[in-house]
Amino acid sequence: MKNLYFLHGMESSPKGTKAQLLKKHYPDCIIPHLPPDLKKRDKILNDLVKTPSWLIGSSLGGLSALFFAMDKPHLVKEMILLAPAVGFFDSQLFSAEEQDRIHSTYVPNGINCTIFAGTRDNVIPLESILDLIARSPSRTGITFHKLDDDHSLNRYPDKLLESVQKMVDQRSDS
């Protein structure tokens, strides 16, 4: 399965729990190793994604997916975001300009997006994710799931796999 990408979070890697779960079920899923630096992540994605693709992003990977979709919506067919880092602000990690960009993220019009958030997430406030949805120009393409989980969202791997399968099924119908 080409053009399916998983973007891991800041403290994860292509060997993380979700990455390995996706690789097991979708062996062709592309999982690049991404550094914590947002500009370097952007460059890697810009160099890697050249045709319309499906993005799955966890935490900082979700933020990276959003930035890429905002910059190049014509290259994003659909997204699944797992606790996207839209409310995590560390002045040591992010410049003022990056923090402003994070505050203004949105799901671009015409891109279907499934977002998962944990009700016990102590890293990304649920309100920040709800604000992301509210800022998005068209909320009709956004599906939002609150799960009884923490930031890792590892308690419900079946929910992630169901969403990916739904995305894959829709993809084969088009």
Image (cartoon, helix red, strand yellow):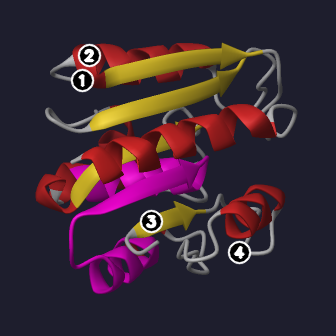
N-term-proximal mark, 2 vs 3: 3
The earlier-in-sequence mark between 1 and 3 is: 3
Disc number at residue 14?
4
Circle 3 SS class: strand
Residue marked by disc 1: 136
Residue 102: assigned label: none
Residue 86 position within the rendered picture, expressed as x and y whole percent measured from the top left: 48, 36
Q: CA distance from mark 3 to mark 4?
A: 14 Å
Mark 2–mark 1 Cα distance, whole angstroms, equals 6 Å
> Mark 1 packing: few (<14 Cα in 10 Å), some, or many (20+)?
some
Which residue is rendered at x = 28% and y = 45% of the image?
A: 173
Give the CA distance from mark 2 to mark 3. 23 Å
Q: How far apart, in angstroms, are the residues tagged by discs 4 and 1?
A: 29 Å
Magenta highlight range: 40-69
Q: Secondary structure at mark 2?
A: helix
Name the amino acid, label 2: Arg
| Residue 82 on image: x %, y % | 60, 39
